[in-house]
Amino acid sequence: MKRIIYILCLAGLVSSCGTTKKQVEQQPVVSIQFNADSAYQFCAAQCNFGPRTMNSEAHEQCGQWIQQKFQQYGYQVELQKADLKGYDGTILRSTNIIANSPLSTLHSPLSRILICAHWDSRPWADNDPNPDNWRTPVMAANDGASGVAVMLELARLIQQHDSLNVAVDFICFDAEDWGIPQWDETGDGTDSWALGAQHWAKSQQQKANSQQPYQYAILLDMVGGQGAKFYQEGYSMQKAGQIVEKVWRAASAAGYGSFFPMKESGFVTDDHVPVNDIANIPCVDIINHYPDCQQSSFGPTWHTVSDDMQHIDKNTLQAIGQTLLQVIYNE
């Protein structure tokens, strides 16, 4: 009798496991294909302007180009300009580039989700192994341009495949990377990162009752690096755990689970923090994590002069872009 009960229980366990696996597999696989070649070109186009450091001509020109690309794909662009104060007192002429979906109107019954990334470049390669480069601007192919490139390709595909059940907006946050450099021992590092996101999040408090709130947000940061993996970031787990689960399951369904380990990483100060804490929008940070990299857990090119197009991997861009298509077209 014990043996029969054991077999029945075991059968029940197998059945249960089979059901769980079947439920995961039943998520419809999105047939729309992300084009990593296109995203790679969007990344290169930003780098062709040079480092997009705050208050530079390259920054101004690239911002205009990003605006025009979103408009080309049918998005209504709002430029949120502000003079923000850097950690060292520098006044930063900041522009958050907000691309609103044609479906994202004040009276639309559709749910809204937000995808965001920063578009400015780090002005100092303060983590470079060569001290002579510590005050050299970073090209920021991965740490900035890659996230914007993925968003532009998503916007292009959304225009071609208008079967979404949600409105997807995009924001390119500015002034994310003016945080206090490692070589500066005099400046005030408090809240010196993610200045554009802080400004936008505060403005959202005023709009909270005037438009459909965002269901959730996804931040893309450093999503094109060679050998990149995307662990589950600490603040994201605390503030938006259900969205983390949604994204990581989508990665598995899309066939890119190997890029998204079911493991937690540390807590990262990034644009998603004010989105979560000030705007009260559950926001997940998809950010690369290299647990075995001695130079930095953000990878070997982080805040170095090597953050260039030679170190961008189309396979990584593909994994991120296809995962996001899997998320938004299953809403």
Image (cartoon, grey):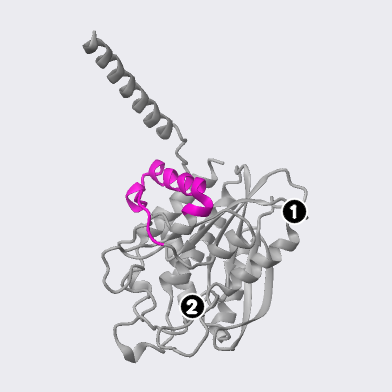
**Where is mark 2, residue-wise?**
121
Q: Is residue 40 left or right of residue 89?
A: left
Residue placed most toward the observer, 9 or 152: 9
Prevailing SS of the magenta stretch: helix
Look at the image and say whether residue 39 sits in the magenta stretch.
no
Q: CA distance from mark 2 to mark 1?
A: 32 Å
Towards the viewer: 78 or 181: 181
Can you say whether 177 is above or below 290 in the image?
below
Q: Write down the residue under mark 1.
A: 211
- Give the total number of marks visible in the rendering: 2
| Quadrant of the rendering where the N terminus is positioned | top left
Task: Assign a secondary structure to mark 2.
Answer: loop
**Secondary structure at numbered mark 1:** loop
Q: Give coordinates of residue 15: x percent, y percent.
A: 34, 21
Residue range corresponding to the magenta coloring: 237-266
- Give me the residue at 55% from left, 86% from top: 56
